[in-house]
Amino acid sequence: MKGWRSSLLVLMLLAASAQGQHADIDRLMTLKPTGIGTQRINPIPGVWFFEMPFAEAIFKDSAGMKNILIPEQIHSIHLVYTRFREVDSFNQPKLNYYRFKELKAICPDIFKEKEIQWKVLEQRDAKTKEDAAKCFHGFVVYLKNTPRKELIEKELKVVKKIIDTYKDSLTWIPEKIEWKVKKVKIETGYYLPRNEDKKRKGVRYSSSMLGFREKEYRIRRDSTIKKKTGGFYARKGWFDTSVFKNIHEYTFLSSRNWSKKMAVVTDVTGSMSLYTTQVMLWLKYRPEVLAEGRFVFFNDGDATPDMLKRLGSTGGIHFAGSNRYDSVYSVMEETMRKGTGGDIPENNLEAVLATLKNWPDTDTVLMIADNDAPVKDMSLLVKIKKPVSVMVCGASEKVHRDYIDIAKNTGGRLFVMNTELSNLQKMNSGSEIIIKGRKFEYKNGELVRKKG
């Protein structure tokens, strides 16, 4: 028993991991087993179970395996075995080796694929041979959570089309002044008669008659400037309106001055392509924003199967630390191609934390988020110590509570339909807010549009 454990230890010290390399069997043998209870067999889309008998290295059914296991479609492969052994001399590493060898004989190409993630799982619940024989043994294969390539290319084509059809011009925004009117009482120098009939007839006196008559006053209206806007040239963008309308995000982003140490974190999953396009146009035509090079794109896992995603370590976060538009665009494009999210909730806060770790001197984060997608890692919010402002895309009838909570709890702002909402900490249940001429009410943690 000590012999096989010593051999395994030597193999483990040869390398830390086989991930990211050609996964030949010798390297796979250096993987440290991860202890689990019992492997569950859940026949769900995207997961394949290829079973071997207890203590044997041959598949129960290998028909069609070669057609199923297409290397570029595989995310990860787990070898599963049971720790229980009848005799101390049983050599588990040797059995694992022959199981890998059997898999390679049937599907050699998967051992050449660099991106496949391999794991070895040791089941530890079984205490008898009978229990061990009932456990699953063999390989569990997880396919990538990847959309059809043609769908991604179609979205990227739309992005490029919008950018190529963009034209801008400088438009004069006329000055608009909002006045505040104040009433001021001014003495006329005359005194009013005590008789009401004489007052109505306009009788006035030049003396107070020893204080018995009241002074006459007239009302003067003084006007002061309450608010002044406009009186400047603004850059207006014009797009191919056959692609989309309501260009709130680009107009808003382009009309503001932003902190030089702000990082921009953008969700590029699912239906975000039209909003991502506006972000890219903003960066292309506002070089002062592009200058600092703090841009992050995330896709919730780089095609990781949903059941393998782990809170805080889902991944799919790509940094563009460049002040060159073409470089930032390439990172955005690569992030979209690597995955579009899978399940609906996204790993927004994992992306924010990764951003702050990568650029510790960042003073604020601007998150570009999908209002229709909840945030799966809200429990990470307590770890964020910098303001996070959220531009909520696709909101029309309500604003999702997660994005309100993120901005509210970090001291950030909320940008909705070309409207900035600040001082969110003062927003209480029942508060009413006007967003682009529409009345919204804050209730149950959400901003909901009021009907009528």
Image: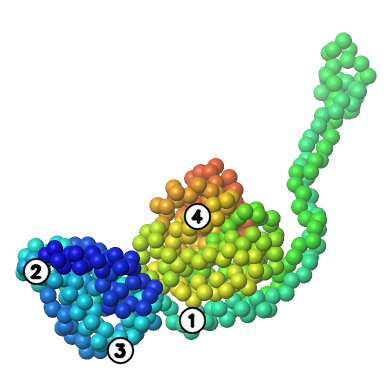
Q: Residue at x 17, y 64 (%)?
A: 5
The amino acid type found where label 2 is placed reads Ser
Label number found at residue 151: 1
Q: Which is more foreground, mark 3 or mark 4?
A: 4
| Mark 4 or mark 1: whose residue is earlier in sequence | 1
Q: Quadrant of the N terminus?
A: bottom left
Sort mark 3 into few (<14), some (14-19) or many (20+) by Cα contacts within 10 Å. few
Separation of marks 1 and 2 at Cα, in angstroms: 54 Å
Name the residue tied to disc 4. Answer: 357
Quadrant in which residue 20 is drawn? bottom left
What x and y, as percent, mark residue 245? 62, 72
381 sits to left or right of 436? left
| Mark 3 or mark 4: whose residue is earlier in sequence | 3
Does dot 4 land on a helix, a strand or a loop? helix
> Which residue is situated farthest in the right direction here?
206
- Asked whether the beta carbons under mark 1 and mark 3 sit within 8 Å of each other, the answer is no
Label number found at residue 89: 2
**How many circles with numbers are drawn on the protein?**
4
One can see residue 433 in this view: no
Q: Which is more foreground, mark 1 or mark 3?
A: 3
- Asked whether the beta carbons under mark 4 and mark 1 sit within 8 Å of each other, the answer is no
Q: Which is more foreground, mark 4 or mark 2?
A: 2
Q: Residue at x 93, y 19 (%)?
A: 206
Sort mark 4 into few (<14), some (14-19) or many (20+) by Cα contacts within 10 Å. few
Does dot 3 land on a helix, a strand or a loop? helix
Does dot 2 land on a helix, a strand or a loop? loop
Separation of marks 4 and 1 at Cα, in angstroms: 33 Å
Quadrant in which residue 161 is drawn? bottom right
Name the residue tied to disc 3. Answer: 67
Separation of marks 3 and 4 at Cα, in angstroms: 43 Å
